Amino acid sequence: MRTISGVNVNFPAAFALALLLGLTLGALPSGAVVVIPPGGLTATPAGKDFLLSFPTTSPKLYTVQASPDLVQPWTNCPAAAQGDGTVKSLTLTNALAAGQGFYRLVVQSPASLILPQATAFALLGYDCGGISEQVYLTGFDPATGGPTGIVNLSTSCSGSGRGAHSTTHTASAAVTWDFSGNVVSATTNFNAATVSSTFLATDKSGNTVYNVGALAYLVVPLPAAPARVVAVQSEDSFLVSWAPMGINPLAVTSSTVTAAPVGSTNPVLTATVTGTATNGILSPLSPATTYQVTVVTTSISGSGPASAPVSVTSAPATIPPSAPTNVVASWSNLDPTGATDSLVVNWPATVPGNSPVDQYQIVAASDSGSVLTNSVSGTTLTTYFNVDYIPNWSATVRAHNAAGWGAVSAAAHLGGL
């Protein structure tokens, strides 16, 4: 057994038994070879049909998958089953008529769908030591596509005084969730709705909702590798876009974008965007460097495989940084006791051009003709000068990247104390 992103999968080995669990070739029609993974599934031939059975534990989702030759993709057999502690059976009609078949059991752990207690209290109006919930999913919302269901609420409040009786308050709510298990809407349900404790449904994107007793669960597929990945350079950044695949785009909880340098020690760039966004920004780019850009999408079930890498080479450094703006100069001590004080210069990060800023140069000049220069790294946005506080001072800043020095900022002026 291997575990892949929270999904337990029993894989058939390439050299697996022609028949498992004591079955013999003589018990099957001529030419039929069936390989079943060890553990989980048991098999019983019935003429040309094949009966697969497996034990379940609540509340996982169990799906039998088949492949004719292990080269073609695995496909789901007709229906999934929710775990409830019983043994489930599935009949594959005509499975043993000819050829060969390979089967495996996929077991997925679901997300539990509930109504937050604060929302339950807002609908019920009472909370006497906790609100009990019975949750029954009924399908998918036609507008948002998210799971829908009925939540029955109750809380029992003890009376006061001798002979007082407890009072039970109840309400029913119609609820819609998103594919992350968050409540999208919840309203008091005045119409009695028919619910089933064994309801199970799967939408066209493979999202499955089901009930086990009075509990409700959601299983979202692992995403496939994203497609149509495009990376376009803008200044010292890649603007990356992509299309999620194998999943309803609304079920994506985050995406991680990575640009890995090829044949270079330059740093790997990565960024994670939350929610259903399909674009992200990677920076700062090293100039004239080839990157392999990939995207991984994630649902509540885990992360899918990375997209096929897209090779993009950043432009050589030809544009120096712009002049820093909003440079501010101040004294660190407005009432110094000595003859000197610290002149503090601050500025926001400048527009870098088409390669990262690697350093800033700061020049402080006084009316008396003193000129002092500091240099700091491209990520440092503050510097200090220990100077005579009596004359007036000014400070300017300029930035440097692989293309050279940018323009000097406007001067920030500071009078003596």
Image (cartoon, rainbow, N blue to C red):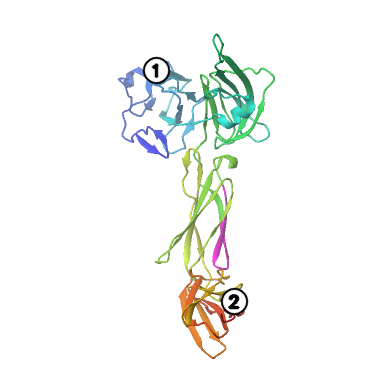
Please provide the residue range marked out in magenta: 230-243
The foreground one among 136 and 1 is 136
Foreground: disc 1 or disc 2: 2
**Looking at numbered disc 1 in the image, what kind of residue is underneath it?**
Pro
Task: Classify 10 Å Cα crowding around label 1: few (below 14), some (14-19), many (20 and above).
Answer: some
Quote the CA–CA distance across marks 1 and 2.
79 Å
Q: Residue furthest front?
A: 337
**Image quadrant in which the C terminus is located:** bottom right
**Image quadrant in which the N terminus is located:** top left
**Looking at numbered disc 2 in the image, what kind of residue is underneath it?**
Ala
Q: Is residue 163 above or below residue 192?
A: above
Q: Secondary structure at mark 2?
A: loop
Residue 131 drawn at (x, y percent):
55, 24
Residue 74 drawn at (x, y percent):
46, 34
> In this figure, which residue is indicated by the disc labeled 2?
323
Residue beneath the point at 59% across and 42% down: 249
Residue beneath the point at 48% across and 23% down: 81
Q: Secondary structure at mark 1?
A: strand
Q: Is residue 191 left or right of residue 121?
A: right
Residue 250 drawn at (x, y percent):
60, 41
The foreground one among 388 and 344 is 388
Magenta segment's dominant SS is strand
> In this figure, which residue is indicated by the disc labeled 1?
45
71 part of magenta stretch: no
Residue 231 drawn at (x, y percent):
56, 59
